[in-house]
Image: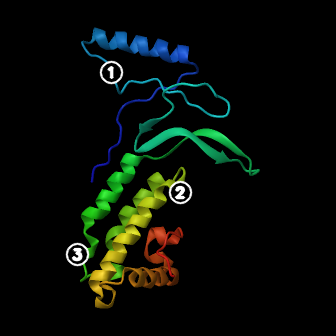
Amino acid sequence: MKFPHSTHPVAHCRSRKDAEKLHDSLKERFAKCGLELHPTKTRIVYCKNDDRRGRYPETKFDFLGYTFRPRRSKNKYGKHFVNFTPAVSNKAKKAMRQAIHDWRIHLKPDKTLEDLSRIFNPVIRGWVNYYGRFYKSELYSVLRHMDRALVRWAQRKFKKFAIHKRRATYWLGRIARREPKLFVHWQMGIMPATG
């Protein structure tokens, strides 16, 4: 599966003046090689945080599946502050949800939960290990999407749940609490409801 990662380099400068100077010198260097900078992908982004409070039109960018932008953070003393940090990008989340959709879990009623765990846990673990390094909570919507796919599987597998989505959800939620190690995201506390 391919993710929409950016392969464009990122350069960090101390001031807008330095950034503009770098931009001009790159433009000049590219021109000498018969190339040009991409007009929309080459941007100067202001890394806004509590120490940099200026107003600029561009204050975020995507890189390697992350979106870097100003976010509210909490320090070790519980005080809130604004920090310029990464979290999984919307494009990456969309790609992960699409991957879950493409797995067609609901069309595998012959499989057990343990089978599904063996098949899909390595991928989910990879996502959590990569995208969960910063602002793990941004990943939760994708993991809940996985739970919804498992509920649909349960509805297909067991006749008693066929038209009872809530019952299937509660049943899966009880299993998740009894066997949290079955799925990586269950170990993180992202589980179906139990009623």
Cα gap from disc 2 to disc 1, whole angstroms:
34 Å
Residue at which label 1 appears: 39
Q: Along the horizontal axis of the image, is 191 left or right of 96?
A: right
Circle 3 Cα neighbour tier, 10 Å, few/some/many (<14 / 14–19 / ≥20): few
Q: Along the horizontal axis of the image, is 128 left or right of 38?
A: right
Q: Is residue 103 above or below residue 116?
A: above
Q: Which mark is residue 137?
A: 2
Amino acid type indicated by mark 1? Pro
Cα gap from disc 2 to disc 3, whole angstroms:
29 Å
- Scheme of colours in the image: rainbow
Q: Residue at x 31, y 63 (%)?
A: 100
* Sequence-earlier tag: 2 or 3: 3
Which image quadrant: the N terminus? Answer: bottom left
Q: In the structure shown, which secondary structural element does the residue marked by tag 1 occupy?
A: loop
Residue 9 position within the rendered picture, expressed as x and y whole percent measured from the top left? 40, 30
Mark 2 touches mark 1? (CB < 8 Å): no
Residue 151 position within the rendered picture, expressed as x and y whole percent measured from the top left? 36, 76
Amino acid type indicated by mark 2? Ser
Q: Within the image, what quadrant is residue 103 found in?
A: bottom left
Mark 3 touches mark 1? (CB < 8 Å): no
Q: Nearer the viewer, residue 141 or 15?
A: 141
* Sequence-earlier tag: 3 or 1: 1
Residue 62 position within the rendered picture, expressed as x and y whole percent measured from the top left? 42, 38
Amino acid type indicated by mark 3? Leu
Q: Which mark is residue 107?
A: 3
Circle 2 Cα neighbour tier, 10 Å, few/some/many (<14 / 14–19 / ≥20): few
Cα gap from disc 3 to disc 1, whole angstroms:
45 Å
Q: Nearer the viewer, residue 151 or 114?
A: 151
Q: Residue at x 36, y 84 (%)?
A: 164
Q: Residue at x 48, y 73 (%)?
A: 191
Q: In the structure shown, which secondary structural element does the residue marked by tag 3 occupy?
A: helix
